Amino acid sequence: MKVPKGKYAWTATVGDKGQIVIPKQARDLFDIKPGDTLLLLGDEKRGIAVPPKGAFSEIFERVFDNQEAE
């Protein structure tokens, strides 16, 4: 199977405390450092998504910018 450019897949094991370890290649690719906050989005039918770490601040900027314009 040919993997599309820029697409990746990793696995992670859930520990006893419900924690997962993000694979090193993924941490390096997305510049995830200890102490970073990640946003988890869930859909009962589609699963869990972890958007890029900058998405969290971008979402709030959009929300607050829209409120100021009103």
Image: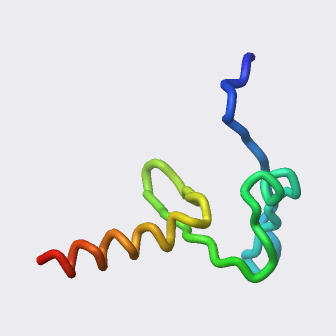
Q: How is the image coloured?
A: rainbow
Q: Most extreme residue toward the top, as rendered?
A: 1
Lateral position of residue 62 relative to residue 32, left or right: left
**Relative to 8, is 49 above or below?**
below
Q: Position of residue 14 (x, y in %)?
A: 77, 66
In this rendered view, identify the residue nearer to me: 18 or 62: 62
Q: Residue at x 85, y 51 (%)?
A: 25
- Number of residue marks: 0
The vertical placement of 21 against 64, above or below, is above
Tell me if residue 54 comes above or below residue 11 in the rendering. Answer: below
Quadrant for the N terminus, please. Answer: top right
Residue at the image point whose x is 75% and y is 66% from the top: 32
Residue 62 spot, x, y in % from top left: 33, 69
Q: Is residue 16 above or below residue 42?
A: below
Q: Residue furthest left?
A: 70
Nearest the camera: 5 or 70? 70
| Front one among 6 and 47 | 6
Left or right for 58, reference 1: left
Where residue 31 appears, x then y in whole percent? 76, 62
Considering every residue shown, the one lying at the far right of the view is: 24
Residue 35 placement: quadrant:
bottom right
| Quadrant assignment for the C terminus | bottom left
Q: Depth check: give the residue in front, 46 or 25.
A: 25
Residue 69: x %, y % from top left: 16, 75
* Residue located at (77% from left, 46% from top): 10
What is the quadrant of residue 3 in the picture?
Answer: top right
Q: Is residue 56 left or right of residue 20?
A: left
